[in-house]
Image (spheres, rainbow, N blue to C red):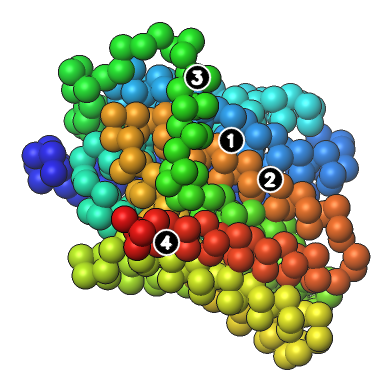
Amino acid sequence: MNPTTTDHGWKVLAILSTLMAFASISTDLYLPAMPAISESLRTDAGMIEWTVSGYLIGFSVGQLFWGPIGDRYGRRLPVAIGLVLFIIGSAGCVLANSVWSMIGWRVVQAVGACSGVVLSRAITRDLFEKERAAQMLSTLMTIMATAPLVGPLLGGQVLAIAGWRAIFWLLVGIGTLTLVALATLPETLPHPRRRREPLGRVLIDYLDLLTNRRLLAYTGAGAFFYAGLFAYIAGTPFAYITYYHVPPQYYGVLFAVGIVGIMAANFANAKLIPRIQSTTLLTRGTALAALAGILLAVAVRQGWGGLVGLVLPLFIFIGSAGFIIANSIAGALARFPDRAGAVSALVGAIQYGSGILGSGLVGVFADGTPWPMAAVIALSGIGSFLCARSLQNSIVST
């Protein structure tokens, strides 16, 4: 373990948690304001939803650039530049007077925000070895999981008091405070460990990484799960509110239950890692996700249990994230410690790309029932398990 960890433990933990939470706070805060933004910018709900899609696309693609830059120039400078872009993008959203300008500034915001997310994972790998890195990632994700719980509630209050533009001013403030706090974070990648190859070799590096079967298995386990996770995010508003007639004000409660499940599983994962290998925990977590997905699909198809038959397997599926995401990322990073930034970027881009695909499939196959969501989640859980199982098989064979 790097000595700076003990010297700055709680500060490092707080800053890394904030950086990782940027993916959530950038969207969760303004979700309650989307109807108000639609009215203010004189556009329909479908166009406003593109502010989310544009953000996800920028967030996914942007990671592919920040990772190699972090491996070449260190971690702090790229994160600082990313935070400046995030601040500029957030201010642009405040001043936006059309939906297209809002979408454009959301892309800028996303490209900036993802620098902190991708490089905070690389920093964790700089400071800790594989098992300890998985434990720390679980701790960080437990902390950052509070963002989806607090974000919509806080955004709703800001909207009621000061209007939707104040939400983006709040994001400007969060970005500025994080930039100031970054000055206290030690540089975790010393000059001798930085890569010297030209950045033009980035594409070749990514192609080289994609030839490693174990890296692909770790990445696949997380990516398949992300497809199911985003299918859940896209499908549950309709499934709960429209199909099962849950009052909209209670949707947030059901959503929060899933977040609590993730936090509990992340906490358990961090406690179990000293006794059980992270790859074993990953396999067990994906098995749980696959089982929950299958139960969900059967319950929805057969009409078993009504709303309870939907909520319970979804809770188990979402909670399994605590055993899947941190362990899959840590396992992938452990394969290439000298290219932690590039690996983190590749893993993040594939995961969010899979998330866009998962949510898109729910929309394409929408039939007025929760079945498309359930089917995507079931297939995602099975795919995640098969990837993790291949890792266990390779360990046994060696």
Left or right: 9, with 221 as reference point: left
- The one nearer the camera, 305 or 174, is 305
Which corner quadrant of the image does residue 134 belong to?
Answer: bottom left
Foreground tag (2 vs 4): 4
In the picture, the quarter occupied by the C terminus is: bottom left
Secondary structure type for disc 1:
helix
Label 3 SS = helix
- Using the image, determine if residue 359 lies above or below residue 367: above
Real-space Cα separation, disc 3 to disc 2, in angstroms: 25 Å
N-term-proximal mark, 1 vs 3: 1
Report the residue marked by disc 2.
356
- Say what amino acid the circle numbered 2 marks: Ile
> Residue 167, percent across and down?
58, 42
Q: CA distance from mark 4 to mark 3?
A: 29 Å
In the rendered structure, are the residues bearing label 1 and label 2 in contact, judged by CB atoms less than 8 Å apart?
yes
Q: Which residue is mark 4?
A: 393
Report whether 317 appears left or right of 182. right
Type of amino acid at the residue the image marks with label 3: Ile
| C-alpha span from label 1 to label 2 | 9 Å
Give the labeled residue for mark 1: 60
| Rendered view: 206 above or below 19 | above
Q: Which residue extends farthest right?
A: 367
The crowd level at tag 2 (other Cα within 10 Å; few <14, some 14-19, many 20+) is many
Q: Position of residue 123 (x, y in %)?
A: 29, 36
Q: Are marks 4 and 3 in contact (CB under 8 Å)?
A: no
Left or right: 90 with respect to 275? right
Spatial separation of the CA atoms under disc 1 and disc 4? 31 Å
